[in-house]
Image (cartoon, rainbow, N blue to C red):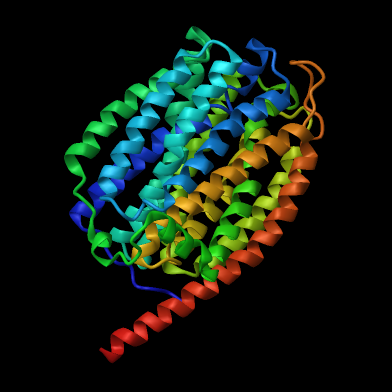
Amino acid sequence: MKQEIIPFTGYQKVVIFLLAITQFTVILDFMVMSPLGDILMKSMSLQPKAFGFAVSAYAFSAGISGLLTAGFADRFDRKKLLMFFYIGFIAGTFFCGLAHTYAELVAARIITGLFGGVIGSISMAIITDLFSLQQRGRVMGFVQMGFGASQVLGVPIGLYLANFWGWEAPFLMVASLAVLIAILILIQLKPITAHLAIQKDKSAILHLWHTVKKRKHRIGFTSTALLSIGGFMMMPFGSAFAINNLKISNDQLVMLFTISGLSSLVIMPIVGRLSDKISKFKIFAGATIWMMGMCVLYTNLSITPFWIVVILNILMMMGVMSRMIPSSALTSAIPEMEDRGAFMSINASLQQIAGGVAAAVAGMIVVQKTTSSPLENYNIVGYVIVVISIISIFLLSRVSKMVTEKTVKSDSTVMKD
């Protein structure tokens, strides 16, 4: 069933831009760990298990941070919360660039995760407060373009800097850019305080408990966690697999990330618009089935011509991106306004923890005898993703049903009034 497309106001467009560029830096900080994986593993003589832990350190600390701040998330102006955590994220990223040993890097990733992991949930609460459900697919499409932009602009530039000045350079680049974005947010974003007038819980702990105990919230949390496990498992070892198994060069790796990122910049706005026009769940289910097939095919590859690797990456990216946008839009519709900050914080927290578990488990599954030998058991990761993705389709169908019932109930109430 087609739905009416609601246009954005001028200020809404400003908010979308601010959230998109903020998301760009946060995603880039996390994403750059994957292409730097091969460089880091070689320069520090790390085994896949140790590198998987370095990636998951960010995710676990982000998850813990989200849980600790969830009770307070609806008790402050969302702009002030965003600024506080973004400044902490900038500091943590600078520390990553100043790290020289594995222990220092892990510590810096933990600090970055404590602050960076909450930014996505605050952004989601802002989107849910300022945009209707009929607009959110497009908003998610634009904001999630940070993922594609990080591959087109950030990752290639980061790899270029890493090849010349060492793996620390990309982190210093991200932190410097984030300083400029923080200034823009301070100047352009208006205070977001409508949720403060309808708060019922007097304590943060009580508010956290009331958010967790709602059955519809728990279904949303479980769905998000499983989606994250499926999405994060392949990512940490993507560059090491491409170089050591598919036998593409470092220069080709830069080109691969650039082309994949450009494709996602085209795909995401289209998927966002379709999500607002057609059934969000149908798009998610179709994209998940597509992604499952591509994951199995890709993880079973051996030495492959570069142009085939590029095509397969684009096709896989289509599936990954096309499930992120409708699932995020559906999940955002679960909580009421007074619970949004807490719900989004817990949801993001579980997303990060699940991602950390995924990276750690993938690190235990994948084996590499030497730092230049092919990765083994990467195809098993692909099969695990398939099983998890099937369960995630079932869970998101329940989320979709809840959102539809809520929308119908809301519409009938409006008609009565």
Please tell me which residue lies in front, 248 or 396: 396
Q: Quadrant of the C terminus?
A: bottom left
125 left or right of 35 in image: left
Expressed as whole percent of the image width and height from the top left, the position of residue 207 reads: 41, 60
285 left or right of 325 in image: right
Expressed as whole percent of the image width and height from the top left, the position of residue 133 reads: 37, 66
Expressed as whole percent of the image width and height from the top left, the position of residue 56 reads: 61, 34
64 left or right of 44 in image: left
Total marks in image:
0
Residue drawn 53% across the image and 11% down it:
163
Instruction: Specify whether residue 315 is in view.
Output: no
In this rendering, the answer to whether 94 lies above or below 290 is above
Please tell me which residue lies in front, 22 or 164: 22
Please tell me which residue lies in front, 36 or 189: 189
Instruction: Specify whether residue 327 is in view.
Output: yes
In this rendering, the answer to whether 199 lies above or below 294 is below
Residue drawn 75% across the image and 15% down it:
372
Q: Residue furthest bottom?
A: 416
Q: Quadrant of residue 199?
A: bottom left
Residue drawn 52% across the image and 29% down it:
110
Expressed as whole percent of the image width and height from the top left, the position of residue 295 reads: 70, 45
